[in-house]
Image (cartoon, helix red, strand yellow):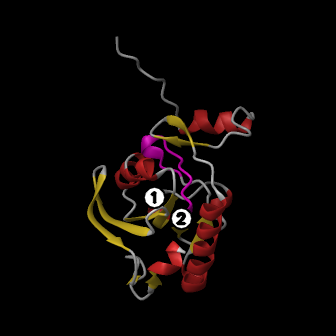
Amino acid sequence: MTLTTAKWTLDDYHRMIEVGLLSGRQVELLNGEIVEMSPEGPEHAQISTDAGDYLRSLLGEKALVRDAKPITIPEINSEPEPDLAIVQPLRAVYRTRHPYPENIFWVIEYSNTSLSKDLDAKRKTYAYAGIKEYWVVDLKNRLLKVLRNPIDENYSDEVTLSEGEISPLAFPEIKVLVQRLLN
């Protein structure tokens, strides 16, 4: 016997949030499924906060760096909450909706216990949405995985860094020091 799970739409998910059904739970909507989010330990929380501050200092008014806030991917009923989303600075728009894929320059996930989820389910979700660049910080091994050029449910380019600098595709003039993201 094959079990089929019920899929949720974005509207279903938003109604659950509005009526408080999901209050007190750390969840996100991925491909129509409500999934538990791993709790953030102190190191994860502080390093991602420091990285967000660092990117804000580099990007200035060119982009908005959102910390652990939802992004909406309507085509596949997903509303993940990346640790950092670097998006177009459309503050007035984001008062009425979360950023859509076309508003996103790149996303960053910090992984301690969630590395397999971030490199599988989230990778597929972000690639399918056409998010051009996805960075995964592996906290256990102190590595930065840079994924670029989405094709279907995957990225065609992947590089792993432990030092040096990287320029985001959207801002080739910006040099991001890898160590500032890892420590």
* Local SS, label 2: strand
Q: Amino acid at mark 2?
A: Ala
Res. 90 visible in picture: no
**Residue 6: percent from left, percent from top:** 48, 24
Q: Which residue is labeled 1 in the image? A: 101
User: Mark 2: few, some, or many residues within 10 Å (few <14, many ≥20)?
Assistant: many
What residue sits 42% from the left and 44% below the top?
A: 75
Quarter the N terminus occupies: top left
Q: Is residue 131 above or below residue 174?
A: above
Magenta stretch secondary structure, dominant: loop
**Residue 18: percent from left, percent from top:** 72, 38
Who is closer to the viewer here, 166 or 100?
166
What residue sits 43% from the left and 81% below the top?
A: 171
Residue 112: in magenta span: no
Residue 74: in magenta span: yes
**Residue 107: percent from left, percent from top:** 48, 64
Q: Amino acid at mark 1?
A: Pro
**Residue 175: percent from left, percent from top:** 44, 86
- Label 2, label 1: how far apart the Cα atoms are: 10 Å
Q: Which residues are magenta?
A: 72-84
Instruction: Classify residue 61 as left or right of residue 135.
Output: right
What residue sits 36% from the left and 68% below the top?
A: 146
Q: Residue furthest front?
A: 141
Q: Are marks 2 and 1 in contact (CB under 8 Å)?
A: no
User: Mark 1: few, some, or many residues within 10 Å (few <14, many ≥20)?
Assistant: some
Q: Is residue 80 above or below residue 157?
A: above
Q: Which residue is labeled 2 in the image? A: 85
What residue sits 61% from the left and 66% below the top?
A: 66
